[in-house]
Image: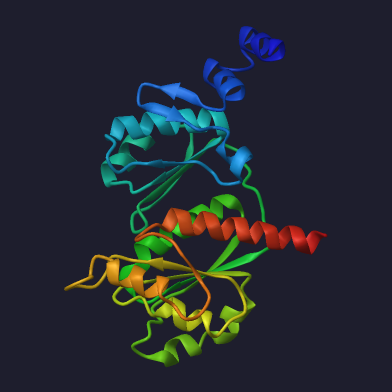
Amino acid sequence: MRDILDAVASGELSPAEAEAKLAGYTTTGAGRFDAARETRRGVPEAILAEGKTPDETATLAAAAVETSGRALITRASHAHVDAVKAMLSDADIDSDPRARTIVATEPGFERPTIDASVGIVTGGTSDAEAAGEAAAVLREMGASTERIEDVGVAHLGRVLDHLETLREMDVLIVAAGREGALPTVVAGLVNTPVIGLPVSTGYGHGGDGEAAMLGMIQSCTVLSVVNVDAGYIAGAQAGLIARAVADARDD
């Protein structure tokens, strides 16, 4: 503790950085940022912009960059992007309007690397938002990803055309709306872990993702399922599996 206090006194550490080292989080006027989550859990903390004002989101992003070198923001609007860019003018900022994600890093930030591959499969173009959120998390965790898009079960030939690639992946995330059949089909064709990501696409009864989630939970092939539109959770879980695969290879 004395070393940290001395570092603050000398200007080597900011008070926010010191708080993060001592408590594991830093406190801002917009809430607390869990700066130790990646070290503790192996998954980068994400700032959920939905429900937060642009200024609140930017304030938390600034705390994240200051204490961990990076801010990962999900469910962001154009206004959130503008606020983060204005507050973090010296940071490197990458935003994906389709996935609604923002990643801000301090100059020279180095991401980890995982020697494992994750396939991200979508039933249709409408599933791209949740799939893109998963891809953003995996990128920050260091796994390589490959997108296989628009291969829904309305024409099984589309997914069968990619079967060789699917079988080469270490982990698969399969996003689908409607009745959620695609993860079940894919899981019956590969010997790799499959994570079903139900998406709130479709219409009519159950079109809010409920039918997709129930279909995946009732799958007769073996797969795991996350909540509706939970791209962050799917990406994080796939990243943890990918890291375990890479560690096993090293051993």
Q: Looking at the image, which residue is at 38% across and 82% down?
A: 152
Q: Looking at the image, which residue is at 59% across and 85% down?
A: 164
The scheme the figure's colours follow is rainbow
Q: In which quarter of the image is the N terminus?
A: top right
Which quadrant of the structure image shows residue 124? bottom left
Residue 161, image x, y percentages: 50, 89
Residue 35, image x, y percentages: 54, 32
Q: Is residue 24 above or below residue 121?
A: above
Q: Nearer the viewer, residue 203 or 102?
A: 203
Q: Looking at the image, which residue is at 62% across and 79% down?
A: 191
Q: Is residue 76 visible?
A: yes
61 vs 203, left or right, is right
164 vs 102, left or right, is right
Q: In which quarter of the image is the C terminus?
A: bottom right
Residue 65, image x, y percentages: 51, 33
Which quadrant of the structure image shows residue 125? bottom left
Q: In this view, does 147 lie above or below 248?
A: below
Q: Which of 222 and 193 is in front in this view?
A: 222
